[in-house]
Amino acid sequence: MEKGRPVALVYRPAQVKQRTPHEVPLVGRAQEVVAELWKARQLGCRLLFHVNGKPLRELKSEWRKACEAAGLTAGRKGGGIVLYNLRHSCLTNLAAAGVPDSTARAISGHKTDSAHKRYVITQAAAKSAALTAMSEAVASGKA
């Protein structure tokens, strides 16, 4: 928190798989949502993400409950929304925005390039643009 506004989600080593501290800056709508959650938390509760003042246990079950509450289907079997698809979307959108892989890895918390690359989906438009550029280079005799 800075000047009463949330600026980042900070994870202690025990909270992340790699056992290293991880910080995710909050901007735009994410910052607004976290500010709303912080203001609406139970009196005296130190937790941002909780159920009745108790820390969340298993993220998958909480995700399923949240989807059900929103009238959505969760999970692959039901053809619903899969939590890790959001990670794919986020990292794919970062790549499309031209964010360097090292920065995207820092945001997602991936330690290695290979782990990061599993989540980045190359869009058809990017493939098309690359092939068009190659064709133009060949046609102009640059290659």
Image (cartoon, grey):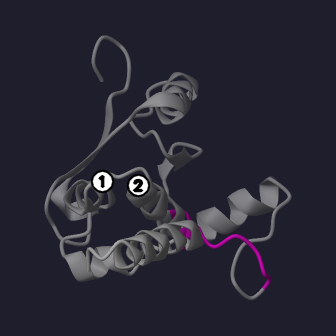
The one nearer the camera, 129 or 101, is 129
Q: Amino acid at mark 1?
A: Ile
Task: Please determine whether, in this image, residue 4 is positioned above or below residue 108.
Answer: above
Which image quarter is the C terminus in? bottom left
Tell me, for residue 94, which label it has, or none: 2
Task: Please determine whether, in this image, residue 76 is positioned above or below residue 32.
Answer: below
Q: Residue at x 29, y 80 (%)?
A: 115
Q: In the displayed image of the protein, which residue is found farthest to the right?
A: 71
Q: Are marks 1 and 2 in contact (CB under 8 Å)?
A: yes
Q: Residue 125 falls in which quadrant of the image?
A: bottom right
The one nearer the camera, 106 or 126, is 126
The one nearer the camera, 101 or 24, is 101
Question: Is residue 57 visible from the viewing direction of this image?
Answer: no
Name the residue carrying label 1. 107
Q: Position of residue 135 (x, y in %)?
A: 44, 77
Name the element at disc 2.
helix
Q: Amino acid at mark 2?
A: Leu
Q: Position of residue 128 (x, y in %)?
A: 54, 72
Query: How many angstroms separate mark 1 from mark 2 (CA)?
Result: 10 Å
Q: Was residue 7 drawn as part of the magenta stretch in this picture?
A: no
Task: Please determine whether, in this image, residue 10 is positioned above or below residue 136.
Answer: above
- State which region is magenta: 78-86
